[in-house]
Protein backbone atom coordinates (compact mmCIF):
# COMPACT_ATOMS: atom_id res chain seq x y z
CA UNK A 1 0.00 0.00 0.00
CA UNK A 2 1.40 3.41 -1.02
CA UNK A 3 1.40 6.23 1.47
CA UNK A 4 0.56 9.91 1.06
CA UNK A 5 3.50 12.13 0.12
CA UNK A 6 2.18 14.75 2.53
CA UNK A 7 0.80 13.04 5.62
CA UNK A 8 1.98 9.40 5.17
CA UNK A 9 -1.54 7.93 5.53
CA UNK A 10 -2.41 4.99 3.28
CA UNK A 11 -3.58 6.01 -0.20
CA UNK A 12 -6.79 4.68 -1.72
CA UNK A 13 -6.06 3.89 -5.41
CA UNK A 14 -8.96 4.84 -7.69
CA UNK A 15 -7.79 4.79 -11.29
CA UNK A 16 -5.15 3.01 -13.32
CA UNK A 17 -4.19 3.91 -16.90
CA UNK A 18 -1.76 1.02 -17.29
CA UNK A 19 1.70 1.07 -18.77
CA UNK A 20 2.60 4.61 -19.75
CA UNK A 21 5.63 6.35 -21.26
CA UNK A 22 6.80 9.81 -20.13
CA UNK A 23 4.38 12.42 -21.46
CA UNK A 24 7.13 14.54 -23.00
CA UNK A 25 9.44 11.78 -24.22
CA UNK A 26 8.83 12.43 -27.95
CA UNK A 27 11.17 9.94 -29.52
CA UNK A 28 13.16 9.25 -32.66
CA UNK A 29 12.14 6.07 -34.51
CA UNK A 30 15.49 4.46 -33.63
CA UNK A 31 14.79 4.95 -29.89
CA UNK A 32 11.55 2.96 -29.89
CA UNK A 33 13.15 -0.30 -28.62
CA UNK A 34 14.52 1.49 -25.54
CA UNK A 35 11.39 3.42 -24.62
CA UNK A 36 10.82 3.84 -20.88
CA UNK A 37 7.47 2.93 -19.32
CA UNK A 38 5.96 3.06 -15.83
CA UNK A 39 2.54 2.28 -14.32
CA UNK A 40 0.29 5.36 -14.33
CA UNK A 41 -2.25 5.20 -11.51
CA UNK A 42 -3.67 7.70 -9.04
CA UNK A 43 -4.94 7.51 -5.48
CA UNK A 44 -6.70 9.66 -2.91
CA UNK A 45 -5.43 10.36 0.58
CA UNK A 46 -8.63 10.24 2.58
CA UNK A 47 -6.86 11.88 5.54
CA UNK A 48 -5.60 15.10 3.93
CA UNK A 49 -7.48 15.07 0.61
CA UNK A 50 -4.38 15.07 -1.59
CA UNK A 51 -4.87 13.27 -4.93
CA UNK A 52 -1.59 11.94 -6.25
CA UNK A 53 0.17 9.45 -8.50
CA UNK A 54 0.96 6.10 -6.91
CA UNK A 55 4.27 6.00 -8.73
CA UNK A 56 6.21 8.92 -10.25
CA UNK A 57 9.34 8.48 -12.36
CA UNK A 58 12.56 10.17 -11.17
CA UNK A 59 12.23 13.94 -11.82
CA UNK A 60 15.63 13.92 -13.56
CA UNK A 61 14.17 11.66 -16.23
CA UNK A 62 11.47 14.25 -16.95
CA UNK A 63 13.17 17.63 -16.43
CA UNK A 64 16.55 17.92 -18.12
CA UNK A 65 18.38 19.77 -20.87
CA UNK A 66 15.95 18.74 -23.63
CA UNK A 67 12.57 19.47 -22.05
CA UNK A 68 10.23 20.16 -24.99
CA UNK A 69 7.52 22.37 -23.42
CA UNK A 70 7.81 26.15 -23.66
CA UNK A 71 5.29 28.40 -21.90
CA UNK A 72 5.36 30.88 -24.78
CA UNK A 73 3.88 28.23 -27.14
CA UNK A 74 0.47 29.66 -26.21
CA UNK A 75 -0.27 33.33 -26.92
CA UNK A 76 -3.24 33.16 -24.53
CA UNK A 77 -1.04 31.83 -21.70
CA UNK A 78 1.52 34.56 -22.39
CA UNK A 79 -1.23 37.18 -21.97
CA UNK A 80 -2.46 35.42 -18.84
CA UNK A 81 1.00 35.65 -17.26
CA UNK A 82 1.46 39.28 -18.31
CA UNK A 83 -1.78 40.08 -16.49
CA UNK A 84 -0.62 38.21 -13.38
CA UNK A 85 2.72 40.06 -13.42
CA UNK A 86 0.92 43.40 -13.79
CA UNK A 87 -1.24 42.57 -10.77
CA UNK A 88 1.75 41.58 -8.64
CA UNK A 89 3.59 44.75 -9.69
CA UNK A 90 0.58 46.84 -8.69
CA UNK A 91 -0.44 45.11 -5.46
CA UNK A 92 2.44 43.24 -3.87
CA UNK A 93 5.79 44.94 -4.47
CA UNK A 94 5.73 47.99 -2.23
CA UNK A 95 8.99 47.33 -0.35
CA UNK A 96 12.14 49.09 -1.57
CA UNK A 97 14.25 46.90 -3.90
CA UNK A 98 11.76 44.00 -3.98
CA UNK A 99 12.71 40.42 -4.82
CA UNK A 100 10.46 38.11 -6.87
CA UNK A 101 11.04 34.36 -7.13
CA UNK A 102 9.35 31.91 -9.47
CA UNK A 103 9.27 28.15 -9.12
CA UNK A 104 9.21 26.40 -12.51
CA UNK A 105 10.03 29.56 -14.49
CA UNK A 106 10.52 27.69 -17.79
CA UNK A 107 11.29 30.13 -20.67
CA UNK A 108 10.86 33.19 -18.45
CA UNK A 109 7.43 34.28 -19.69
CA UNK A 110 6.09 35.22 -16.22
CA UNK A 111 9.31 36.80 -14.90
CA UNK A 112 9.93 38.83 -18.07
CA UNK A 113 7.83 41.88 -17.05
CA UNK A 114 9.77 42.05 -13.76
CA UNK A 115 13.14 41.65 -15.52
CA UNK A 116 12.23 44.40 -17.98
CA UNK A 117 11.62 46.79 -15.07
CA UNK A 118 14.98 45.92 -13.49
CA UNK A 119 13.32 44.18 -10.52
CA UNK A 120 15.46 41.62 -8.69
CA UNK A 121 14.20 38.17 -9.58
CA UNK A 122 15.22 34.51 -9.67
CA UNK A 123 13.60 31.51 -11.27
CA UNK A 124 14.04 27.90 -10.18
CA UNK A 125 14.10 25.87 -13.38
CA UNK A 126 15.75 22.43 -13.56
CA UNK A 127 15.29 22.09 -17.35
CA UNK A 128 18.44 23.77 -18.64
CA UNK A 129 17.29 24.28 -22.24
CA UNK A 130 14.17 26.24 -21.32
CA UNK A 131 16.16 28.21 -18.71
CA UNK A 132 18.59 29.11 -21.52
CA UNK A 133 15.70 30.61 -23.50
CA UNK A 134 14.79 32.65 -20.40
CA UNK A 135 18.41 33.84 -20.09
CA UNK A 136 18.28 35.00 -23.71
CA UNK A 137 15.30 37.19 -22.75
CA UNK A 138 17.14 38.69 -19.75
CA UNK A 139 15.47 36.48 -17.12
CA UNK A 140 17.81 34.82 -14.58
CA UNK A 141 17.16 31.29 -13.43
CA UNK A 142 18.90 28.80 -11.21
CA UNK A 143 19.07 25.46 -12.95
CA UNK A 144 17.91 23.45 -9.99
CA UNK A 145 14.89 21.80 -8.40
CA UNK A 146 13.06 23.90 -5.84
CA UNK A 147 12.99 22.38 -2.34
CA UNK A 148 13.94 23.24 1.22
CA UNK A 149 17.69 23.20 0.59
CA UNK A 150 17.74 25.15 -2.69
CA UNK A 151 15.29 27.69 -1.20
CA UNK A 152 17.51 28.13 1.83
CA UNK A 153 20.57 28.65 -0.39
CA UNK A 154 18.80 31.36 -2.37
CA UNK A 155 17.63 33.11 0.83
CA UNK A 156 21.21 33.08 2.18
CA UNK A 157 22.64 34.48 -1.06
CA UNK A 158 19.99 37.06 -1.97
CA UNK A 159 17.70 37.49 1.04
CA UNK A 160 14.03 36.59 1.38
CA UNK A 161 11.41 37.13 -1.31
CA UNK A 162 8.50 39.57 -1.32
CA UNK A 163 6.57 37.27 -3.62
CA UNK A 164 7.05 33.67 -4.69
CA UNK A 165 5.15 32.72 -7.83
CA UNK A 166 4.52 29.29 -9.32
CA UNK A 167 2.27 28.32 -12.23
CA UNK A 168 1.66 24.72 -13.17
CA UNK A 169 4.77 23.87 -11.21
CA UNK A 170 4.03 22.86 -7.60
CA UNK A 171 1.87 19.99 -8.88
CA UNK A 172 5.08 18.63 -10.47
CA UNK A 173 7.19 18.41 -7.29
CA UNK A 174 6.99 15.06 -5.48
CA UNK A 175 7.99 16.24 -1.98
CA UNK A 176 5.29 18.76 -0.96
CA UNK A 177 6.65 19.12 2.57
CA UNK A 178 10.01 20.19 1.21
CA UNK A 179 8.19 22.76 -0.97
CA UNK A 180 6.25 24.12 2.04
CA UNK A 181 9.40 24.20 4.19
CA UNK A 182 11.30 25.91 1.35
CA UNK A 183 8.60 28.57 1.05
CA UNK A 184 8.81 29.00 4.83
CA UNK A 185 12.56 29.70 4.54
CA UNK A 186 12.41 31.94 1.50
CA UNK A 187 9.38 34.15 2.13
CA UNK A 188 9.66 37.53 3.92
CA UNK A 189 7.48 37.77 7.06
CA UNK A 190 4.84 39.67 5.10
CA UNK A 191 5.53 37.97 1.77
CA UNK A 192 3.06 36.02 -0.38
CA UNK A 193 3.21 32.74 -2.24
CA UNK A 194 0.86 32.93 -5.24
CA UNK A 195 0.52 29.72 -7.20
CA UNK A 196 -1.87 28.18 -9.69
CA UNK A 197 -2.41 24.62 -10.86
CA UNK A 198 -5.08 22.60 -12.65
CA UNK A 199 -7.99 22.11 -10.25
CA UNK A 200 -9.10 18.68 -9.11
CA UNK A 201 -12.76 19.79 -9.20
CA UNK A 202 -12.52 20.68 -12.90
CA UNK A 203 -10.71 17.44 -13.72
CA UNK A 204 -13.51 15.45 -12.10
CA UNK A 205 -16.35 17.53 -13.53
CA UNK A 206 -14.99 17.47 -17.10
CA UNK A 207 -13.50 13.95 -17.02
CA UNK A 208 -10.23 15.64 -17.94
CA UNK A 209 -8.28 12.50 -17.08
CA UNK A 210 -5.44 13.60 -19.35
CA UNK A 211 -4.32 16.01 -16.61
CA UNK A 212 -3.01 12.83 -14.99
CA UNK A 213 0.46 12.00 -16.32
CA UNK A 214 3.98 11.47 -15.04
CA UNK A 215 4.79 15.15 -14.44
CA UNK A 216 1.57 15.92 -12.59
CA UNK A 217 2.22 14.08 -9.36
CA UNK A 218 -0.60 16.02 -7.63
CA UNK A 219 -4.08 17.24 -8.49
CA UNK A 220 -4.63 19.91 -5.86
CA UNK A 221 -7.85 21.01 -4.19
CA UNK A 222 -8.50 23.84 -1.74
CA UNK A 223 -8.79 21.26 1.04
CA UNK A 224 -5.47 19.56 0.29
CA UNK A 225 -3.61 22.85 -0.20
CA UNK A 226 -4.86 24.27 3.11
CA UNK A 227 -3.87 21.06 4.90
CA UNK A 228 -0.46 20.96 3.25
CA UNK A 229 0.81 24.43 4.24
CA UNK A 230 -0.81 24.76 7.68
CA UNK A 231 1.85 22.79 9.68
CA UNK A 232 4.55 25.09 8.26
CA UNK A 233 3.08 28.30 9.71
CA UNK A 234 1.61 29.16 6.29
CA UNK A 235 -2.05 29.83 5.68
CA UNK A 236 -4.25 29.75 2.61
CA UNK A 237 -5.72 33.27 2.46
CA UNK A 238 -7.33 33.46 -0.97
CA UNK A 239 -8.57 31.26 -3.81
CA UNK A 240 -9.47 32.40 -7.31
CA UNK A 241 -10.80 30.29 -10.18
CA UNK A 242 -9.04 30.59 -13.55
CA UNK A 243 -10.05 29.35 -17.01
CA UNK A 244 -6.48 28.31 -17.89
CA UNK A 245 -5.49 24.72 -18.68
CA UNK A 246 -9.12 23.63 -18.64
CA UNK A 247 -9.87 25.00 -15.16
CA UNK A 248 -7.31 25.98 -12.55
CA UNK A 249 -7.25 27.62 -9.13
CA UNK A 250 -4.91 30.35 -8.01
CA UNK A 251 -3.99 30.03 -4.32
CA UNK A 252 -2.51 32.81 -2.18
CA UNK A 253 -0.56 31.75 0.90
CA UNK A 254 0.77 34.02 3.67
CA UNK A 255 2.46 33.46 6.99
CA UNK A 256 -0.18 32.57 9.57
CA UNK A 257 -1.51 35.68 11.30
CA UNK A 258 -0.31 38.16 8.64
CA UNK A 259 -3.30 38.30 6.29
CA UNK A 260 -6.96 37.63 7.12
CA UNK A 261 -8.30 34.86 4.88
CA UNK A 262 -10.91 36.01 2.36
CA UNK A 263 -14.41 34.55 2.51
CA UNK A 264 -13.59 32.66 -0.70
CA UNK A 265 -11.48 30.15 1.24
CA UNK A 266 -14.32 28.95 3.47
CA UNK A 267 -16.81 28.89 0.62
CA UNK A 268 -14.49 26.78 -1.55
CA UNK A 269 -13.89 24.40 1.37
CA UNK A 270 -17.65 24.07 1.87
CA UNK A 271 -18.18 23.52 -1.87
CA UNK A 272 -15.58 20.74 -1.90
CA UNK A 273 -17.24 19.02 1.06
CA UNK A 274 -20.61 19.25 -0.74
CA UNK A 275 -19.08 17.76 -3.91
CA UNK A 276 -17.41 14.89 -2.03
CA UNK A 277 -13.90 15.85 -3.15
CA UNK A 278 -12.40 13.83 -0.31
CA UNK A 279 -14.66 10.79 -0.69
CA UNK A 280 -13.67 7.67 -2.53
CA UNK A 281 -17.12 7.21 -4.13
CA UNK A 282 -16.57 10.43 -6.11
CA UNK A 283 -13.38 9.00 -7.55
CA UNK A 284 -14.92 5.61 -8.37
CA UNK A 285 -17.48 7.52 -10.46
CA UNK A 286 -14.61 9.41 -12.14
CA UNK A 287 -12.94 6.13 -13.10
CA UNK A 288 -16.15 4.93 -14.73
CA UNK A 289 -16.43 8.25 -16.57
CA UNK A 290 -12.86 7.82 -17.86
CA UNK A 291 -13.75 4.37 -19.21
CA UNK A 292 -16.86 5.74 -20.95
CA UNK A 293 -14.88 8.62 -22.44
CA UNK A 294 -12.26 6.20 -23.77
CA UNK A 295 -14.87 3.88 -25.29
CA UNK A 296 -16.69 6.77 -26.97
CA UNK A 297 -13.52 8.28 -28.41
CA UNK A 298 -12.25 4.97 -29.75
CA UNK A 299 -15.72 4.15 -31.12
CA UNK A 300 -15.85 7.48 -32.96
CA UNK A 301 -12.35 7.05 -34.44
CA UNK A 302 -13.17 3.50 -35.57
CA UNK A 303 -16.32 4.72 -37.31
CA UNK A 304 -14.36 7.46 -39.06
CA UNK A 305 -11.76 4.95 -40.20
CA UNK A 306 -14.52 2.68 -41.54
CA UNK A 307 -15.82 5.71 -43.51
CA UNK A 308 -12.29 6.32 -44.85
CA UNK A 309 -12.16 9.75 -43.19
CA UNK A 310 -8.70 11.06 -42.42
CA UNK A 311 -8.00 12.19 -38.83
CA UNK A 312 -5.03 14.22 -37.57
CA UNK A 313 -4.20 15.25 -34.02
CA UNK A 314 -3.85 18.96 -33.24
CA UNK A 315 -1.01 19.78 -30.76
CA UNK A 316 1.35 17.16 -29.36
CA UNK A 317 0.58 17.97 -25.75
CA UNK A 318 1.81 16.19 -22.63
CA UNK A 319 -1.80 15.41 -21.80
CA UNK A 320 -2.31 13.59 -25.09
CA UNK A 321 0.19 10.92 -24.04
CA UNK A 322 -2.32 9.70 -21.44
CA UNK A 323 -5.22 9.81 -23.91
CA UNK A 324 -3.46 8.11 -26.82
CA UNK A 325 -1.95 5.34 -24.69
CA UNK A 326 -4.96 4.71 -22.44
CA UNK A 327 -7.25 4.56 -25.49
CA UNK A 328 -4.77 2.57 -27.58
CA UNK A 329 -4.83 5.15 -30.40
CA UNK A 330 -1.94 4.85 -32.86
CA UNK A 331 -1.13 5.88 -36.45
CA UNK A 332 -3.85 3.58 -37.79
CA UNK A 333 -6.47 5.92 -36.28
CA UNK A 334 -4.65 9.27 -36.19
CA UNK A 335 -2.41 9.84 -39.21
CA UNK A 336 -0.12 12.51 -37.71
CA UNK A 337 -0.13 15.16 -35.01
CA UNK A 338 0.73 18.74 -35.94
CA UNK A 339 2.51 20.95 -33.43
CA UNK A 340 4.28 24.31 -33.32
CA UNK A 341 7.29 23.15 -31.27
CA UNK A 342 10.34 22.50 -33.50
CA UNK A 343 11.86 20.14 -30.87
CA UNK A 344 8.93 17.73 -31.40
CA UNK A 345 9.04 17.68 -35.22
CA UNK A 346 10.20 14.45 -36.84
CA UNK A 347 9.62 12.64 -33.54
CA UNK A 348 6.99 10.09 -32.59
CA UNK A 349 4.40 10.57 -29.86
CA UNK A 350 5.43 8.64 -26.71
CA UNK A 351 4.13 5.08 -26.63
CA UNK A 352 1.60 5.58 -29.43
CA UNK A 353 4.25 6.37 -32.10
CA UNK A 354 2.27 8.80 -34.24
CA UNK A 355 4.52 11.11 -36.33
CA UNK A 356 4.66 14.73 -35.10
CA UNK A 357 4.78 17.22 -37.97
CA UNK A 358 5.16 21.00 -38.19
CA UNK A 359 2.02 23.07 -37.94
CA UNK A 360 2.25 24.00 -41.63
CA UNK A 361 1.41 20.39 -42.53
CA UNK A 362 -2.02 20.75 -40.96
CA UNK A 363 -2.99 22.90 -43.94
CA UNK A 364 -0.84 21.05 -46.46
CA UNK A 365 -2.16 17.58 -45.56
CA UNK A 366 -5.64 18.85 -44.65
CA UNK A 367 -7.38 16.03 -42.71
CA UNK A 368 -11.16 15.58 -42.66
CA UNK A 369 -11.19 15.61 -38.85
CA UNK A 370 -8.85 17.20 -36.31
CA UNK A 371 -8.67 15.70 -32.82
CA UNK A 372 -8.04 18.69 -30.56
CA UNK A 373 -5.44 17.34 -28.15
CA UNK A 374 -4.92 20.85 -26.72
CA UNK A 375 -8.61 21.17 -25.78
CA UNK A 376 -7.50 23.57 -23.02
CA UNK A 377 -6.50 26.08 -25.74
CA UNK A 378 -9.76 25.62 -27.68
CA UNK A 379 -10.60 29.32 -28.06
CA UNK A 380 -7.08 30.24 -29.13
CA UNK A 381 -6.81 27.40 -31.65
CA UNK A 382 -10.32 27.41 -33.13
CA UNK A 383 -10.03 31.18 -33.48
CA UNK A 384 -6.85 30.82 -35.49
CA UNK A 385 -7.98 27.83 -37.57
CA UNK A 386 -11.30 29.15 -38.84
CA UNK A 387 -10.18 28.24 -42.36
CA UNK A 388 -10.20 24.53 -41.43
CA UNK A 389 -13.92 24.51 -40.62
CA UNK A 390 -14.70 26.82 -43.52
CA UNK A 391 -13.02 24.31 -45.85
CA UNK A 392 -15.29 21.54 -44.47
CA UNK A 393 -13.00 20.20 -41.72
CA UNK A 394 -14.46 18.99 -38.40
CA UNK A 395 -13.09 19.30 -34.88
CA UNK A 396 -13.23 16.40 -32.41
CA UNK A 397 -12.90 17.14 -28.71
CA UNK A 398 -12.87 14.63 -25.85
CA UNK A 399 -13.19 17.09 -22.94
CA UNK A 400 -15.62 17.86 -21.38
CA UNK A 401 -17.31 15.17 -23.50
CA UNK A 402 -16.46 13.29 -26.65
CA UNK A 403 -18.07 15.11 -29.56
CA UNK A 404 -17.65 16.38 -33.09
CA UNK A 405 -18.13 20.13 -32.88
CA UNK A 406 -20.93 21.52 -35.00
O1 LIG B 1 1.81 21.42 -16.67
C1 LIG B 1 2.31 21.54 -17.77
C2 LIG B 1 1.71 22.49 -18.72
C3 LIG B 1 1.71 23.89 -18.19
O2 LIG B 1 2.38 22.52 -19.94
C4 LIG B 1 3.50 20.77 -18.17
N1 LIG B 1 3.63 19.58 -17.39
C5 LIG B 1 3.66 20.51 -19.62
C6 LIG B 1 2.74 21.28 -20.50
O3 LIG B 1 1.58 20.51 -20.73
P1 LIG B 1 0.96 20.35 -22.21
O4 LIG B 1 2.04 19.92 -23.14
O5 LIG B 1 -0.21 19.48 -22.10
O6 LIG B 1 0.62 21.87 -22.48
P2 LIG B 1 -0.30 22.61 -23.52
O7 LIG B 1 -0.04 24.06 -23.33
O8 LIG B 1 -1.70 22.16 -23.44
O9 LIG B 1 0.23 22.16 -24.96
C7 LIG B 1 1.46 22.58 -25.44
C8 LIG B 1 1.73 21.96 -26.79
O10 LIG B 1 0.72 22.34 -27.72
C9 LIG B 1 3.06 22.43 -27.35
O11 LIG B 1 3.74 21.33 -27.96
C10 LIG B 1 2.66 23.44 -28.40
C11 LIG B 1 1.33 22.93 -28.86
N2 LIG B 1 0.45 23.95 -29.41
C12 LIG B 1 0.24 24.00 -30.79
O12 LIG B 1 0.80 23.19 -31.54
N3 LIG B 1 -0.56 24.99 -31.29
C13 LIG B 1 -0.15 24.84 -28.57
C14 LIG B 1 -0.97 25.84 -29.08
C15 LIG B 1 -1.63 26.84 -28.17
C16 LIG B 1 -1.16 25.91 -30.50
O13 LIG B 1 -1.89 26.78 -31.00
N1 LIG C 1 5.38 27.75 -15.22
C1 LIG C 1 5.35 27.39 -16.61
C2 LIG C 1 5.96 25.98 -16.86
C3 LIG C 1 5.10 24.83 -16.44
S1 LIG C 1 5.80 23.26 -16.92
C4 LIG C 1 3.96 27.46 -17.17
O1 LIG C 1 2.98 27.54 -16.43
O2 LIG C 1 3.84 27.40 -18.40
C5 LIG C 1 6.52 22.77 -15.38
C6 LIG C 1 7.90 23.39 -15.20
O3 LIG C 1 8.34 23.09 -13.86
C7 LIG C 1 8.96 22.83 -16.15
O4 LIG C 1 9.62 23.90 -16.78
C8 LIG C 1 9.86 22.01 -15.23
O5 LIG C 1 11.20 21.95 -15.68
C9 LIG C 1 9.70 22.74 -13.91
N2 LIG C 1 9.99 21.96 -12.69
C10 LIG C 1 9.82 20.65 -12.48
N3 LIG C 1 10.20 20.32 -11.23
C11 LIG C 1 10.60 21.46 -10.62
C12 LIG C 1 11.11 21.77 -9.33
N4 LIG C 1 11.28 20.84 -8.38
N5 LIG C 1 11.45 23.06 -9.09
C13 LIG C 1 11.28 24.02 -10.02
N6 LIG C 1 10.80 23.78 -11.26
C14 LIG C 1 10.47 22.52 -11.55
Image (cartoon, grey):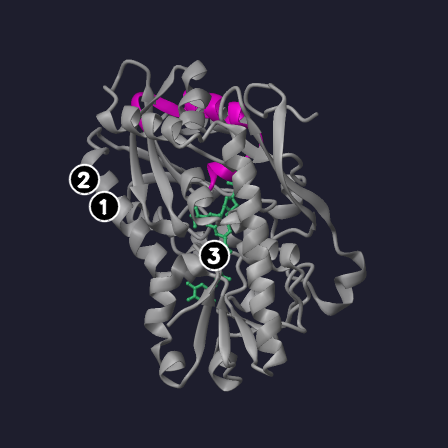
Position of residue 265 in the picture relative to residue 168 (left or right): left
Position of residue 224 in the picture relative to residue 270 (left or right): right
Looking at the rendered structure, the secondary structure element under dot 1 is helix
Sequence order check, earlier mark of 1 and 3:
3
Question: In 3D space, how far apart are the residues under numbered discs 2 and 1 (Cα atoms)?
Answer: 6 Å
Q: Classify 10 Å Cα crowding around label 1: few (below 14), some (14-19), many (20 and above).
A: few
Marks 2 and 1 close (CB-CB < 8 Å): yes
- The answer to whether 275 is drawn above or below residue 241 in the figure is above
Q: Residue at x 38, y 68 (%)?
A: 381
Question: In 3D space, how far apart are the residues under numbered discs 1 and 3 (Cα atoms)?
Answer: 21 Å
Q: Position of residue 119 (x, y in %)?
A: 29, 41
Q: Tell me, yes or no, if residue 48 can be seen here.
A: yes
Pick the residue in front: 237 or 104: 237
Q: Which residue is drawn at 54% across and 63% down?
A: 316
Q: Disc 3 marks which residue?
A: 70
Marks 1 and 3 close (CB-CB < 8 Å): no
Sequence order check, earlier mark of 3 and 2:
3
Q: What stretch is highlighted in magenta?
A: 169-192
Q: Disc 1 marks which residue?
A: 86
How many numbered dots are placed on residues in this image? 3
Q: Where is residue 354 in the image (x, y as percent from the top left)?
A: 65, 69
Q: Disc 2 marks which residue?
A: 90
Q: Classify 10 Å Cα crowding around label 2: few (below 14), some (14-19), many (20 and above).
A: few
Q: Residue at x 36, y 55 (%)?
A: 77
Amino acid sequence: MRSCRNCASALAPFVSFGRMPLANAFLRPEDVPNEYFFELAAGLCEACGLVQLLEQPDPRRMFHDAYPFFTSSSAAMTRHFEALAARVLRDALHAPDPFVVEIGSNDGTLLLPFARRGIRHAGFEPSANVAAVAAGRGVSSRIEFFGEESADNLACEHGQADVILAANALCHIPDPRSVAAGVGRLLKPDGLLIFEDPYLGDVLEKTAYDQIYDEHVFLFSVTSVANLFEPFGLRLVDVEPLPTHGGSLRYTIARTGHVAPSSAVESWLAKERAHGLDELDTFEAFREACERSRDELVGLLLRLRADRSRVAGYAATSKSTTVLNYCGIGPELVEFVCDTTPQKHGRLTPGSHIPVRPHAEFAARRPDYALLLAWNHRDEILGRERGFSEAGGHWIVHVPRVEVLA
